[in-house]
Structure formats: structure tokens, C-alpha cells
Image: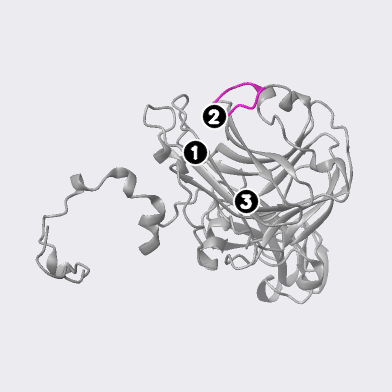
Amino acid sequence: MSYIGKTPTPAPLTSSDITDGIITTTKIADANVTNPKLTSGSQQNFRNIIINGDMSIAQRGTSFTGQTSANYIVDRFTQTINGAIGTWTNGQSTEVPTGQGFAKSLIMDCTTADASPAANDILWVQQKIEGQNLQYLKKGTANAESLTASFWVKSAKTGTYIAELEDRDNNRYVSKSYTISSANTWEKKTVTFPGDTTGAFNNDNAESFRLNFWLGGGATWTSGTLGTTWHTTAANRAVGQVNLADSTSNDWYVTGVQLEAGTTASDFEFLPVDVNLLRCRRYFEKSSNMNSALIATNEGVVTIRDGTASTINRYYNIQYSVEKRATPTLTPYDIAGTTGKVRRDATNGANGNVFSAGSTCFNINTPSGVSHYGISFGWYADAEL
């Protein structure tokens, strides 16, 4: 529009200037409404497929030494060491990227090197995921969703690393590389994986899916061409991956792990600590810290008192804080930390108490004919994938 004289001073539109119905969904281009814009003003709850991606929950402990096989590090994250590909100290660390809101990270620290992995050797950190949590990804259909992984990572060893999605139901894989450019420097990485139109996930509480962070691997997994589209070839899984096990100077930290549907990474979804803890307890729960010194102070110990020197058969029921994924393996321990035992009256290491576990609770049976005033014990329940 042209004007005679001075052009009027521009003024921003307000809600009163826009008539209802003027801006319709057909006038908004799909490409202009992105995940970051949607989440900047309102949170899309639980968009992160990964549980405990900020590494804040570590129910089993914060440091584990001499690691040479599979073991949980922090909750929901496990290491896989197939073959003699180094010895490791791992656990939860307070080393985090500055100003990003994280308080904890996961660390893998090499303590015994292996410069020449055997063909079948594997070293990775991974999270396993239930199939029933993944149905909205529409895998195995023409509408299969792409997935984007984002995370903060730091290592003394620079070079090429591989992040991989693994479909356990159909034995299919897809890998993307990322580069650690500067030693001992936190860097944020984002990789996007294509949707897979072949092979649906089972709709159950068993393992269907894995996010794998490769840290080393032998020729069986690295001798082909990196499989950046979904495939079934072992040799294409980790091509180009550096060997983190080749020096005791090497370490690897990760935090802020997020995996979400779509081709754009949104800001990390921080959950309240109580919500995060309950999500982890679906897979693993303990009554107290698994440490004899703390157990000796009765922290978290279950104590049942009869009041008299009872010799009759009694049953007690103890509820978990959250229903488990499946019937867990239940391990009791006395207050000195000895597993498979309970404390009867003032005596640690007593036998004869039967534990029967379900997915929501477990029972303890104090058998007849055994005189006691009461029993004390700690316990942990493992329903991991």
C-alpha cells in the first residue's frame, strides 16, 4: 500500500486484530510447525523413549570396578562386553556439561587395555526397551516413524563412534556415526534414523528394541559398509568405530540421552526425580542401599515383630512401590549384607524363611517350629529386560 506523506509507524498485531477463523490450519505450512516450537511453550510429556537419560538414578551403586562382562551401570543402562575387550571401571559421575541442567553422567573408564579386539568382541553401552512402549512408531508399516537421538558426550579419545538402533524382534539394525572432535570436551550430538517399513514390534512386555552406543568391536561387526538404512548384515553394524579399549588413558562420558519420534531433536525432557525413580523401579527396586555398612544402621530394612517367641507358621505380604514389568527375581539379605539370608532376633544369617514373589508384591513365610521374636531383612527385586 502506498501513502501520501509519512509512512505510519508499524505496530504489532494483537489478538483483538485477528478475527476468529481467519488463521486456519490449511494456512500454516507443516514445515513451519516443528518439535522445538511445539515444546517451547508446552511440554509433550514422555516423548523421550529412553528412561533415565539424565543418568540421575543409580539404585545399584555409583561405581563398579574390574568390569569384564555385562552389567548395569546406572538404572536402565547396561554395558555389554563380549570377549576380552578391556577391563573397565564404570558408574555414575558428576562430570557434566556446564549450564545444560544435568547433574550426573555415565562414565566408562578403561583400566586394562586391549589394542587388538578379537573378531567377535563387542563393547557397547545400551538401553533395552519394551515392545508395548513402541507401538506408536508404526514400525513395519508404510507410516513408520523416523527416530532422532540426541545426547551429550565427552571422551579422551577422539574419532568416529557409532550409535545404533537394534530391532530384537526381527533382527534388524540401523547405524549412524558421530564424531568426537575435541578430547575431554563436552559435545552435543544429534543423529536421525529412518523409519523401518519392515518388521513390526511385538506388543508385549518383552524386549523389542535397543539403543546401542558402540565403544569398540571386532571384524565381525566392522568389516563391511556402515548400514545407515535398516539391514540384517552383522559386518555393517559398527564400521569405522574407534577402539575405546586401546589405552588405559581412554574414557567415555554420556548424559542427556533422548530418543524421540521425528527428524528433529527437541530439548531434553527433564522429569521430576520421583517420576524418574518410579519408571526405573518398574525394572529394579531395592529396599535399601545395597551396602552392608548402611544396612547395619537399619536404613531401609524390613522388620517384622511377633512380640512373642513364635513357633507357628506365619505369612507376611510386602508391596512394591510400583508394579514390576514381570515377576522379578527376588533376593533377600540380612542386615550384614549376606544375600539369601535374614536376621532372626539378634542373629544374622538365619535360614528357613520362604520368599514368593509376584509382579506387585512378595510374601515371606516364617516356618513353624522355629522360635523367634521377629525377623529383619533387606531385599531387591530384578525384573530387567
In the displayed structure, does residue 338 sit left or right of residue 181? right
Judge whether 311 appears above or below 231 on screen.
below
Badge 2 marks a residue whose secondary structure is loop
Q: Position of residue 281 (x, y in %)?
A: 58, 57
For the residues marked 2 and 1, what is the alpha-carbon distance in whole angstroms?
9 Å
Question: What amino acid is labelled 2 in the image?
Answer: Asp
Residue type beneath disc 1: Gly
Residue at x-position 69% and y-position 67%: 288
In magenta segment, residue 208: no
Q: Is residue 171 left or right of residue 42?
A: right
Figure quadrant of residue 166: top right
Q: Position of residue 54 (x, y in %)?
A: 60, 59
Mark 3 and mark 2 lie on one chain; the one further toward the N terminus is 3
The part of the chain drawn in magenta is 225-233
Q: Which residue is mark 2?
A: 169
| Residue denoted by label 1 | 131
User: Looking at the image, which residue is at 82% across and 34% down?
Assistant: 83
Q: Nearer the viewer, residue 290 or 29?
A: 29
Location of the C terminus (image quadrant): top right
Dividing the picture into quadrants, the one containing residue 364 is bottom right
Residue hosting label 3: 76
